[in-house]
Amino acid sequence: MSASSPSPVKRRGLGDHVILAAVLVLSVAMVAPVLWVIGLSLKDNTELMANPNSVFHPPYIIGNYIAIIGTSAVFRWILNSLIVSIGVTFGTLVLASLAGYGFARLEFPGRRVLFVIVLFGLAVPEQAVLVARHQIFSILHFHNTYHGIILPGLSNAFGVFLMTQYFRAIPKELDEAALLDNASRFKIFWKVLLPLTLPAQATLGIFTFLGSWNDYFWPLISATRKEMYTLTVGMASVQSNFAQSEGVGFLMAQAVFAGLPIFIVYLFFQKYIVTAVSGAAVR
């Protein structure tokens, strides 16, 4: 018995090595494009035009980043993306929390029908309402404004569904105890229930912010003036119009510079991002 017992350990160890090797290969495949972009951003544009393989050997320079700070509109685009992403995230959290509380805790005529209509929003693609939305915003003169880019992102059916399900999971005895203490409905929502939904709000807020930051489709249509471009639209316009004149290194430096805000957000909110992806509860 003792002689045969090590074999499962050996098999388990071999499996661990295989999994580790696969993870390393996939990690290299994921990181390689990022390292490639960083390497290109540190090379002189003229040298890259003459020999693209020069990215693999020095010298490396920071001239492309200095050029961004001095001449590029990327700062304005980052500011626009921050305003839009924060506005969409804050508005989504407020509206989804209020709607979720209403659907989960309040009784009013047509509640079930209205909730089903909200769920239908999960199945309707954005492209299906694009023409109507564009015409409405044109009539209201909302294009090339911050609220014109932010407002469509507030109709987050998934956020309403998530908060509704989370509020339903909270015991109703808490409401009843607060009502016995003569607390109003809003006070129950604000003081008692809302703090208990912080895990769901963190998850919803993280995904909403990242989705809004990376959104390209609606800002491309609504923002037609360069000063109102978000980062995704601005970077795409530079790559399509000035790739040859500005140089590949300068474009890659802009891409690295544009990714820094998200990297900083990840550093500060790493715990919550991992929790949101894994679906675990935030503690």
Image (cartoon, grey):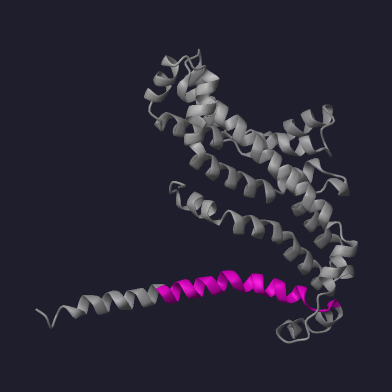
Q: Evaluate whether residue 61 shows in this view.
A: yes
Residue 98 lies, in percent from the top left, at 57, 27
Side (left or right) of 117 relative to 77: left
Q: Residue at x 67, y 38 (%)?
A: 153
**Would residue 36 be counted in the magenta stretch?**
yes
Q: Residue furthest left?
A: 1
Residue 47 lies, in percent from the top left, at 83, 82
Q: Which residues are magenta?
A: 20-45
Q: Evaluate whether residue 122 shows in this view.
A: no
Q: State the image quarter where residue 74 is shown.
A: bottom right
Q: Residue at x 39, y 72 (%)?
A: 19
Q: Is residue 143 above or below residue 8?
A: above
Residue 82 lies, in percent from the top left, at 73, 47
Q: Is residue 128 above or below residue 46?
A: above
Q: Residue at x 82, y 36 (%)?
A: 143
Q: Residue at x 75, y 63 (%)?
A: 257
Question: Which one is nearer the viewer's eye here, 268 or 211?
Answer: 268
Side (left or right) of 78 relative to 95: right
Residue 178 lies, in percent from the top left, at 44, 20
